[in-house]
Amino acid sequence: MPKCTIDGKQIEFAAGTNLIEVAKSAGIEIPFYCYHPGLSIVAQCRMCAVEIEGMPKLQTACSTNATDGMVVKTNSERSVANQKSVMEFLLINHPLDCSICDKSGECDLQDFSYRYGSAHMRYEEERRTFVDDDMGPIIKKNMNRCIHCTRCIRFADEIADKREIVALQRGNHTEIVTVEGKPLATEYAGCYADICPTGSLTLKDFRFQKRVWFLKKTPSVCEGCSRGCNMDISWEKDTVYRCNPRTNMEVNKWWMCDEGRFNFHYVHNPLRIVEPETMSDGRTAKVDWDKAIHAATHATTGKKAVVLVGSDLTQEELQGIQKFATKKLGGAQVFHFGTPGVKTVADDKDIDHLLKRASKTANLNGVEKLGIQPFDKVPAGAQVAVVFRGGRAQLPNLGSTPVVGVGVFFTEEAKNFAAVLPGASFAEKNGTIINWKGMEQKLQAAIPAVGHSKQLAEILLHWTHGAAKEEVIPAAAGEITA
Amino acid sequence: MEAQKGKWETIYIQHFREEARPLKYYLDQMEGYQALKKCLGLTPDDIINEVKKSNLRGRGGAGFPTGTKWGFIPKQSPKPKYVVCNADESEPGTFKDRDLMRYTPHLLIEGMVIAGHAIGANVGYIYIRGEYTREAKLLDEAINEAYAKGYLGNDVLGTGFKFDLTVHRGAGAYICGEETGLLNSLEGKRGEPRVKPPFPAQAGAFGGPTIVNNVETLCAVPFIMRKGGEWFAKFGKFEKSGGTRLFCVSGHVKKPGLYELPAGAITIRELIYDYCGGILDDKPLKAVIPGGSSAPVLTASEIDVALDIEPMMKAKTMLGSAGIMVVAEGFDVVKLIRRITKFYAHESCGQCTPCREGCRWMEEILGRIMDGKGKRQDTDMLLSIADNINGKTLCALGDAAAGPVISFVTKFKPDFEAKMPAGGTHA
């Protein structure tokens, strides 16, 4: 392998790798704004300019590939002077509003200005300001904070495949706008906020919700479709505030669709049933777990049951349900449901150019691997349906069959259920899902189960052993408090 | 545009008359399209070697050897190759290409077809600045004449060589005179320079290998090919710089205008006093900007420099596009550099940080100094900002803006200080 020297360190590299990445591989940080490994290289922020032996001018590390024997200095006097100078230029028109800026705490401009900037400001002229236009429901623009890296323009053009963001005017008056002021149309608009190195493009959804330094991140996987985009769940105490894509070059690279990004909101939806419910006198009523288990047992005992499982459940949950159906529900048949029109993996196709898949549940592949057949209609003679659902699978029409629901349900859809045993959503549980490519990926619990909802394993144990047996199964509850 | 009374042989300037424009004049008086006829019988290498021999250097400003540039074009290319003429002529103080296009459009057309044959391109574009409406129309007319007579088209002069030529009008942006900004604009994109490499010779217009040459450069080609590279090279007085040059003299001289002289034959002083009749109202000379407004300024005592690329570089300025602006004593040089800086701040495309932010910053400080609100440390500040731009930008616009500021502030510091409020305060 060829070798180059960066800051005195000999580093091996694969041909065609730029200096930023080569340096990164050896733990050397070269600061940059406009560079993004997933976008074309424009070398315009000039922050990454470094000294290369034998070249009279500083060279941008993003646009310069390492060559064998190349000697690079990222911290020489000239490189450092340029970093300081670029920082100064970027800050002369940037408002000092970190205290009210949502990017604060995870802002490249802020971080680098601590590391490379100066505490003293030489600029005394008037700052350039813009009036912001609306960019649609996802993104809030603040042009005054923009440092013109053009990542958003390139993302629109190269990744979202929609030329919807452009630069208007030129020079110091350059403004980032949507074409003809239209709202953003891409279904990946949240990525604009991810790639923006400043607080110029932020998520309307997350704005003013939480300072990012209070948030903890749990690496998990999106349950929005069969792609299984890797993501971080950002949470504090018992609340999820945000989901962001986590880089996985084999699955989603750096990106994530808005549907998946904002999917987590149902976790805290006030209409989500988080306390056990039973039907009495034609109305659902909140009850304690013992009563609910009792009602579920009552509804299924001595009846021919059919079991329906959402393809949004994990492998562990599904296996537990299979056993439960055999042992406790008299060998009831198990069928899966999830996305109308997507019964098997053969129906599960890419539905756009980037990430989205037809199956709106994450584990269709896993369900099939366990030999579970797709649900078509309630089998003849079935007197009760026990429906297990993670949170995304779309309930099939069960006609007038009595239903016991286990998992995540909402008030409206469960209003005729005989009993609801509230379970954990993706954000509240651990487990394995298998994406369309056959990759096993892990969901990780970020928060404890909301309200009185419980892990499925716990519910099944409770049901199996009867009411008032809660105390004998501490293991499942313990899993999520770590 | 006065002819130079026989002292030096000239190539173009004697034809800068309305009656020179039609094809008939070009054929009768300028041996029009004879060079093309000859070239179509030569191999591309023969042509490139002849151009190399001529020591023709780019007339747009950078002065890169033309033959060498052509030699960079790969012989085989999966993508079509292109000949692009940079007729953006946007450097303030430059107006030579305008007259070449206005009076001798066929010269440019012939030069482009020859260049096309030399690099194996079948398509050419003349990217002309938006303000040159009249010249664009004249070029279109000349191109139509050339198509009608078979100098352009699918079968150039019956040899089977195909060459199509189109005039593409810019929309009035200085940055589209930068070759990659020009190519982006030509492709219908925002006129912003590209990261180099790849250079246009590898991936230029529409991704194909492309040469981008200035109007004057391409206009030299028919002469070189007809009369020989050595003939052209002999005009030059310095090594590796051949031919004559068109000097655009403006400002405080008695006879401003276009002058054609052999490269390096005379000094700036001679041009001003022997050719242009000296300074207006016989005032003393204050300053000369020798190569378009982006060239660092020279003081009255620095003008004994031969008008060619290398001597100017030694004098720490540049011949650039040979737009020579003469400033008489009594004219406010601070106002001048403020106006120049305002121009570059206005024309900065805005993609790269130092140019976008720095040019505007310098403009603001200069504006403040003009308004009598300067501070003693402003001159140092200007030098510091200019230094932070110089050589650190994506394209040469940053240098074009920084160089003049550095030279004006360094050479005319008392003029700046005279504008500071008495006793100039620290902030």
Image (cartoon, coloured by chain):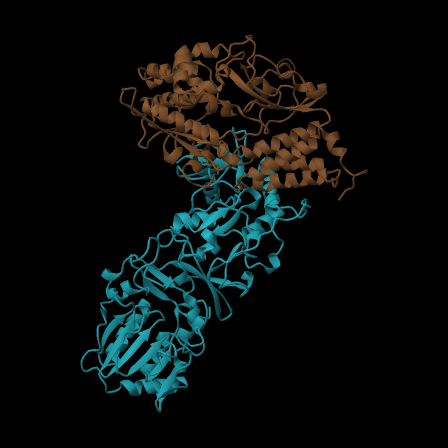
Q: Say which of A357 and B230 sits in front.
A: B230
Relative vertical location of residue A135 with respect to residue A413 in this rendering, above or below: above
Relative vertical location of residue A308 with respect to residue A366 in this rendering, above or below: below
Q: Say which of A133 and A245 sits in front.
A: A133
Most extreme residue toward the top, as rendered? B7
Quarter of the picture holding the N terminus of chain B: top right
Which residue is at 54% across, 36% downward? B393
Q: Quadrant of residue B374?
A: top right
Q: Is residue B427 left or right of residue B10?
A: right
- Chain A: its colour in the image is cyan
How many numbered circles does the render carry? 0
Relative vertical location of residue B251 with respect to residue A138 in this rendering, above or below: above
Rendered location of residue A293, percent (x, y): 35, 84
Q: Is residue B211 visible?
A: no
Q: Is residue B426 left or right of residue B297?
A: right
Q: Is residue A178 visible?
A: yes
Rendered location of residue B56, percent (x, y): 47, 17
Rendered location of residue A84, percent (x, y): 61, 42
Rendered location of residue A330, percent (x, y): 22, 81
Relative vertical location of residue A146 with respect to residue B336 in this rendering, above or below: below
Q: Say which of A298 and B275 sits in front.
A: B275
- Chain B: its colour in the image is brown
Q: In this view, does A468 lie to the left or right of B296?
A: left
Quarter of the picture holding the C terminus of chain B: top right
Q: In which quarter of the image is residue B377?
A: top right
Most extreme residue toward the left, as rendered? A380
Most extreme residue toward the bottom, as rendered? A281
